[in-house]
Amino acid sequence: MNVVCIGRNYADHVAELNSARPKQPFYFLKPTTSILLPGEGPVIRPRGVELSYEVELALIMGKTLKDFPVENEAGAIDAIESYALGIDMTARNVQWEAKKKGLPWSINKGFDTFLPMSNIIPKSAIPNPHSIELYLSVNNEVRQNDSTELFLFRVPEMLSAISKVMTLEKGDIVLTGTPKGVGPVGPGDVMRAGISVNGKEIEEAKIEVPVEESTGAYEYAET
Amino acid sequence: MNVVCIGRNYADHVAELNSARPKQPFYFLKPTTSILLPGEGPVIRPRGVELSYEVELALIMGKTLKDFPVENEAGAIDAIESYALGIDMTARNVQWEAKKKGLPWSINKGFDTFLPMSNIIPKSAIPNPHSIELYLSVNNEVRQNDSTELFLFRVPEMLSAISKVMTLEKGDIVLTGTPKGVGPVGPGDVMRAGISVNGKEIEEAKIEVPVEESTGAYEYAET
Ligand SMILES: [Mg+2]
Ligand SMILES: [Mg+2]
Ligand SMILES: [Mg+2]
């Protein structure tokens, strides 16, 4: 099972990180071990890390896709088995170093607990993945709140771009990118996130997860 | 299951790609879909891609490791269930662009067929993973041939560094980096690779795999 995460898929988020706007979708992988299911406990901030949240709609694939044709809009939706909400936790200072030095993103995106997920959202609850509202709050202060209408690349373009490179399989998770408003969280903070469709919140999409400081061996050092 | 690949672990390979020598081990992930088992057919060169080979010793993990202590040499070997040989195929031109632009390596490392693997090598065949010879030939011309004595970071250091970030699980594959001699291959070429221990070749480690041009939808374009 692979977790495939689209980067830079909302213009205002590209701008807030001073990133270049991509000419085509690109992605990175998170390890399966980064997944934190509902109730599994806190997100852990590794020592020396600037920890950032990125709320994202997750697609849970129901079919095998290879070389999926971008023009097949109905087929793209049909290939999705269900949805979830996810928070793509990022070690931002580690990522800045990786970007500067041309290193892979696997460490900065891949710590244990770096992918809190909601419960499964049945497909019927999201009639159109291109028109839902995502939000994320920290200590009940809203930090991210935007519609997937703002996607730079829509679902068929994402699935086409990924599946030209690697086969997508049933059960794979595709994170669709984060809107503007990313920022740091630390020990004692509580993140809450969710999805609204036509102004009505989806119960299964709710995430509530605290942040705690690591007691583990990792401490940030330059690579 | 995760496939974790150590980068820049042999000094002469770091030099041949004009890379900076890392102060600590770093890694990237390959998707499970990149694995090509023995007999599963050719490595596919995506269109517009400079395809490069990197022969590497693979550790197949037998235990769960988290915050593994670097000084536990015996425990590191004990955590390995078996070995294999792998070829970490790389879209080198796509990787150069990623390095220049600070993008993730997941696409350049993650195409379908980009991880040809040998059969499983029983642990008894490799008494010491720090003292075996790897080789890779293209059309029977030897291109890589070095000893794992040249590792910049030895197995305990690799497992410690990885498991400070992410939990390693039974069945995970760790690729240990490639020695010098990487280079391009294309359609019609046949790669052969293997491992010798004390001058004697290990039968299970033998890889023989041809390269074919893609007929798929991907064609290289700038991101
Ligand atoms: Mg994986
Ligand atoms: Mg993200
Ligand atoms: Mg390699």
Image (cartoon, coloured by chain):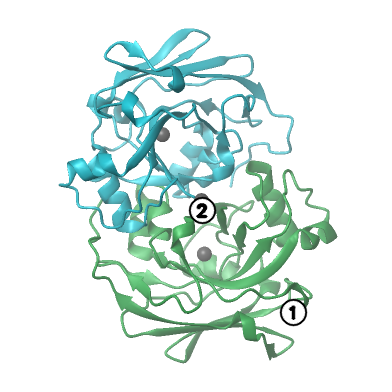
Chain colours: A green, B cyan
Above/below status of A124 relative to B80: below
Above/below status of B140 relative to A16: above
Q: Earlier in the sequence, mark 1 or mark 2?
A: 2
- The residue lying toward the viewer, choosing from A102 and A77, is A77
Callout 1: chain: A
Q: Is mark 2 within 8 Å of ligand 1?
A: yes
Distance of label 1 from label 2 (alpha carbons): 27 Å
| Residue A22 horizontal/vertical position (percent) | 59, 54
Quadrant of res B174: top left
| Numbered circle sitting on residue B36 | none
Give the class, few, some or many, for how many residues have Cα within 10 Å of label 2's Cα (few <14, many ≥20). many
Which residue corresponds to mark 1?
A: A125
Left/right placement of residue B174 relative to residue B9 reads: right
Q: Same chain for the residues at labels 1 and 2, yes or no? A: yes
Q: Amino acid at mark 2?
A: Leu
Above/below status of A122 relative to B183: below
Mark closer to the observer (1, 2): 1
- The residue lying toward the viewer, choosing from A98 and B208, is B208
Q: Amino acid at mark 1?
A: Ala
Q: Secondary structure at mark 1?
A: helix
Which residue corresponds to mark 2?
A: A29
